[in-house]
Amino acid sequence: MKVKIFPLSIPFITSPISDWKDTWDVQLYVKVENNEFYGWGETLVAGSGIIGAYSSVITDVISQVLERQDFESPYDARILLEKILFSAGNCGVISGAISSVEMALWGLMARKNNQSLSELFGGKIRDSVKIYASFPRFNSVKDVLSAVENSITKGFELIKVHQPPSNVIESIKTIREKYKDVKIAIDLNSPFDLAKAQDFVNSIHKYEIEWIEEPLWPPNDYETLSKLAEISPIPIAAGENEYSLYGFKKLLESGITYLQPDIAKIGGISKFLEILDLASKYKVKIAPHDRPDASPLSLIYALNLGLSKSEIEMVEYSIADFPNDLFYSLPITKNGYAVPPDNVNIIETNMNKYKYSNKFRILYFSDLEKKLISK
Ligand SMILES: [Mg+2]
């Protein structure tokens, strides 16, 4: 089997323009092919866009393994790669790199079986998947409000803000005063200690919040998370920075309400299916994470999982437009639901329009403010 990598920069244009415009234009796609069939996959390039690290894991090890051995099963490929690479840590860069290739093997298998992805995942149980509008971080409360207005116009009923601690409460208050019916979730990306998180939930509880996401630093302090879950009047969501089944088990035991694994980070779809199985023993809702940038590749797989797995409550969705000259078909959305194409198919001749641009990126997550690093 051959593995090709494609580092890309898909412009992240939202209305209004966000603080993350120059941070989320970094994508890593892979194509896996044998003599007859092919499949596409995507790695979420995290950590402020350290694309070279992910690319190196694929080209130095993964592609060479697949060149020497054909895999019928994405699960077998993942387990072998995890065993080869585990001393570098089966998380972050390693599991992210494995994700794209594992995902592409499902795409290839669907073509080989002449099936849609949802058929391959067990068959459709619904015709469309519930989605929510996940915002990037905006520079002002006014911009947050315009994004809410635009999302309501597009048919979304749930929006999620990513504002920093310095203006998130004001943003929520302003949204709620203007829009009584819109459902609001808050993604904090791990800024607070327990005391600050407690103060935070107590001060925003009155605005009727669907969930708060990753309230605590560090994100894998399960003990403190369970203390917060016990007293928080607002449901807690987490999981986009979790990788191992053991870690997911600890997270589930902490008492969170929404679990958010990302197939482009954890090691792919077979890992996701194992997490679904594990989660079935807990009272938790599954809401797959998908970075809401302008790249729909891993999202198409996540939505096809959503079509075929009843446990999936809803999928995170971007407010940016996807490039229609890079994909033969894109998800179609209506009234807060999405219908994905049957498989991922890329217009390869147009990939040079999205050449990767190498630049210094800092993702202003958590309590990092834009003024932190300046020239
Ligand atoms: Mg998040």
Image (cartoon, grey):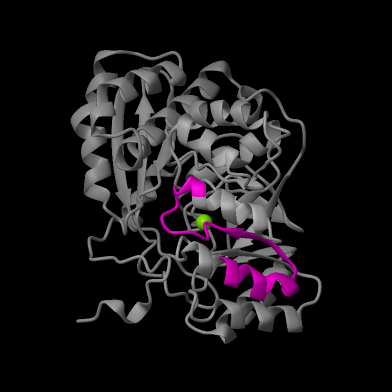
Residue at coordinates 54% horizontally, 51% vertically from top-left? 225
Residue 240 appears anywhere in the view: no
Q: x and y percent of residue 222 in the render?
A: 49, 46
Q: Nearer the viewer, residue 181 or 70?
A: 181
**Magenta segment:** 198-223
Classify 192 as above or below 38.
below
Count of numbered circles on the image: 0
Tell me: 223 left or right of 278: left
99 relative to 56 in the view: left or right: right
Figure check: 191 above or below 282: below
Residue 331 in picture, x, y percent from top left: 62, 48
What is the x, y in percent for residue 32? 36, 28
| Residue 36 picture quarter | top left
Tell me the quarter of the image containing the N terminus.
top left
Position of 32 relative to 209 (above/below)? above
Q: Residue at point 24% right, 29% down? A: 87
Q: Is residue 362 visible?
A: yes
Quarter where residue 30 is shown: top left
- At horizontal 36% and vertical 78% (from top left) the residue drawn is 370
Residue 73 located left or right of residue 352: right
Q: Position of residue 275 (x, y in %)?
A: 56, 31
On whether residue 157 falls in the magenta region, the answer is no
Is residue 201 part of the magenta span, yes or no?
yes
Q: Is residue 98 above or below residue 371?
A: above
State the residue in front, 238 or 69.
Answer: 238
- Please name the residue shown 74% across and 64% down the image: 155
